[in-house]
Amino acid sequence: MSQKPLAERVALVTGAARGIGRAIARRLAQEGAAVLINYATSQDAAAALAEELRGLGVRAETVAADAASPAGVTAMLKTIENGFGNRLDIYVNNAIDVAASGPALKMRAAGWEHTVDTNSTAFLTLAQRAAKLMQGRPGRIVTVSSLGSIYYLPNYAPIGVAKAAAEALTRYLAVEMGPLGITVNAVSAGPVETDALHLYPNYEQMKETAAAISPARRMGTPEDVAAVVAFLCSDASAWITGQTIIADGGLSLLSVR
């Protein structure tokens, strides 16, 4: 029987208790990786996921931590040290702390600064620390982005700018981490059916548009995104770095969004 592609790898997935993060953690475990499940408030969901992943025959631990805070970063690194022998092969930056949403013209500085600055800084800080643990073996860093980084989406201004910053940072990190044997990429997802998406007032419009005009004729699922992330975490993606891979069923090819 052939070995699973991510066997003996250790992965950290932030914001992994729900939605896209949950699907990513599950997919990495299915491919053989041990997974550290980071969450902020969804303790029961994180615990249930860890139990599910252990049922797949891999190690799974949870850590309650704010990925955007120094204390949260320390808590995650401590868990990696104690629970995984201070080894890390994969870091998936999925968590985002949204303090404000809406049109740019109506943004207040505090909410804007928290959403944009905190999230780009969290990605940078964890990537810097992750790189130290990955040296000496192939490392994979992947951040989850969205089409709002390059297209206008209603009520999405601060999140879209935060995602654009993460994509730019992906390119800088890829160049600087390349000599260390680490690849850094982003996955830009189109509309994905998650609980978070339901909070947007134009959710029904997005769903109808995707079903009507997307080449795939449907909205994406968390599993669609997880499959692309898993590929970028594998050895098969070794020649890809500094890229933003759009995974949207072809929706961005069209002029109407």
Image (spheres, grey):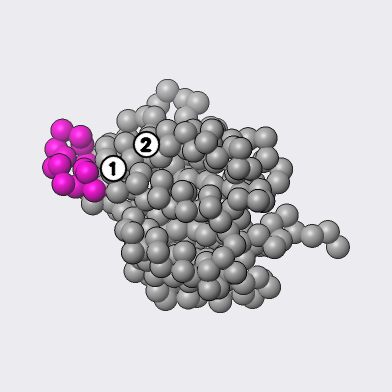
Nearer-the-camera pick, 197 or 142: 142
Q: Which residue is mark 1?
A: 116
Picture residue at 36% right of the left edge, 63% below the top: 72
Outermost residue toward the right in this view: 1
Report whether 95 appears left or right of 222.
Answer: left
Nearer-the-camera pick, 38 or 199: 38
Residue 75 image-quadrant placement: bottom left
Picture residue at 32% right of the left edge, 36% below the top: 161
Verify whether residue 184 appears in magenta.
Answer: no
Quadrant that contains the N terminus: bottom right
On residue 165, which mark appears?
2
Distance, label 2 to label 1, CA atoms, is: 8 Å
SS assignment at label 2: helix
Magenta residues: mostly which secondary structure? helix
On the question of residue 96 being in view, the answer is yes
Q: Amino acid at mark 2?
A: Ala
Q: Amino acid at mark 1?
A: Val
- The residue stretch that appears in magenta: 102-114
Picture residue at 55% right of the left edge, 40% below the top: 177
The spot of residue 236 in percent (x, y) is 71, 43
Residue 83 image-quadrant placement: bottom right
SS assignment at label 1: helix
Nearer-the-camera pick, 137 or 11: 137
Mark 2 closeness class: few <14, some 14–19, many ≥20 residues within 10 Å: some
Verify whether residue 105 appears in magenta.
Answer: yes
Decide: is 190 above or below 222: above
The spot of residue 88 in percent (x, y) is 58, 59
